[in-house]
Amino acid sequence: MQIISDLHQIKTSMVRPHLPYVMCYVFEDRSGKITLFDTGFGTDTAFSELKDKLYDIGYKFTDIENIIISHTHPDHMGMLSRIREVNPSFKLIISEKEYNWLSSRQNRDWQTLGNQWLQKHGMSLEEINNSEQDTQWKNIEWPQLKNPTLVNDLDILQFGEWEFKFLDTPGHTIGHLCMYEVNKKIMLTGDHVLPHISPNVSVDFEGKNNDSLIQYIHSLEKIENYETDIVLPAHEFSFKNLKQRVKELLMHHQERLNEHLMLFQDKSMTAVDVAREISWNTGSFDNFNLMMKRSAVGETVAHLEYLVAKNSLEKINGGHKQVVWSLP
Ligand SMILES: [Zn+2]
C-alpha cells in the first residue's frame, strides 16, 4: 500500500494468531534504490510475500541499500539472513544499545532460565510443566547481525530526499529505535506506539532492565512533541494523531499501576499472584500458554518495579529466594 509518494507499507504474515501481520516500510529514492524499515518474520510465507509485494512496486531484494531495524525481535529482523543470501551488500542499521545488549545475551539456555525466573516469581514447577507450550516459536530463526552500522539517539541518515532521524526509545526493548522523517514529518514507531494494542513492556530474566516501565514512559513523552503528520507502526494500522495516542498509553499505564496497587491492601503477593488477579484483554491468565504467562508475569514485574521505584511498594526476597511484594 502506498502511504505517500515514494513510501510504501508492506504487510507480511506473523505466526501469532492475535497479531495477524507485521508491517515493513519501503522508502524509494530517485536512483532506483530502496531503504527498508523492519523486515518481517523469517518464514517461507513471509519471505515470499515480501518478495512479491516488492516486485509489485517495481523492486527486487538486490535494490535494497539499507535495512533499518526498530528492535531485535524476530518479527522485525527475522528475514535478514534470507535477504542477505540474495543481496549480501545491503547496509544493516541498528541501535548500538540494542546491539550491545543482544551481544551480551548469547549462548544462554533461555528455557531453563525462564522457568527458574517464573519459580522465583511464584509459579510452581507443576504449573510450568502443565502449561501449554508455545510450539510455534520453537523453530524461529534468529539471524546473525553481521557487520551492522550502529546508531545512537538523534543520529541522522540521509537517503535521497529523505532525512531519517533515529530516536532512542527504550521500553519495549532496551534499545528500541523509532525513526522520524524530518521533511515529511513521519514517525515510524516500531513496537513503541501501536494504535490499538498497548505494547508489551517487560523485564528480562537477568534483572538488567527492571526500570523498563520508567524508561518506556520517558520514551513516550520524548516522541510526543515531534510534529507528526503520519504515524507508521509495525503492527495494526497507520494513524495520524500521535499526541492523542501517547496520552492514551500514558493513561493506560497509570490506570494499570493503580489496579496493581489496589490488590495489595494488607497482604503480600508474588508477581504470579498479581498476574493471576489482574485483568488481561487476551483472556484469563490460567488459560495462557507458557510463553504468554512469561510475558504477562514480565509485564507485571515491570509495573511492580515501577511502584517500588516510586516508593509505593516494597520488594522482599523471601524464603526459598522467592520474590514477594507488599505495601511499605
Ligand atoms: Zn513486533
Image (cartoon, rainbow, N blue to C red):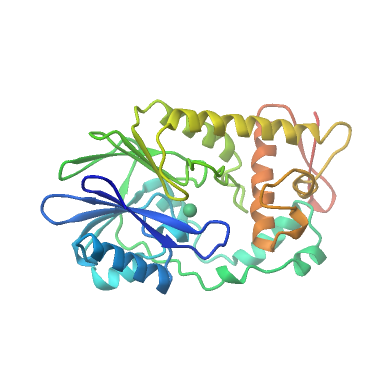
Give the position of the C terminus as an image quadrant.
top right
Residue 103 in view, yes or no: no
Residue 63 falls left or right of residue 265 = left
Q: In percent of the image, x 40 and y 53: which residue is there?
A: 99
Residue visible at 75% across and 59% down in the picture: 287
Q: Residue at x 30, y 68 (%)?
A: 52
315 lies above or below 103: above
Q: Nearer the viewer, residue 328 or 16?
A: 16
- Percent position of residue 100, x then y: 42, 51
Q: Nearer the viewer, residue 8 or 60?
A: 8
Q: Is residue 293 visible from the viewing direction of this image? A: yes
Provide residue 71's location: percent of width, then percent of height.
43, 51
47 relative to 309 in the view: left or right:
left
* Direction left: furthest residue: 31
Nearest the viewer among 122 and 61 is: 61
Image coords of residue 57 (percent x, y): 23, 59
Q: Position of residue 205 (x, y in %)?
A: 62, 54
- Quadrant of res 315: top right
State the residue in front, 69 or 208: 69
Residue located 80% across and 63% down the image: 127
Q: Could you say which quadrant of the image residue 305 lies in?
A: top right
Marker count (numbered): 0
Q: 313 left or right of 235?
A: right
| Residue 174 placement, left or right of 177 | right
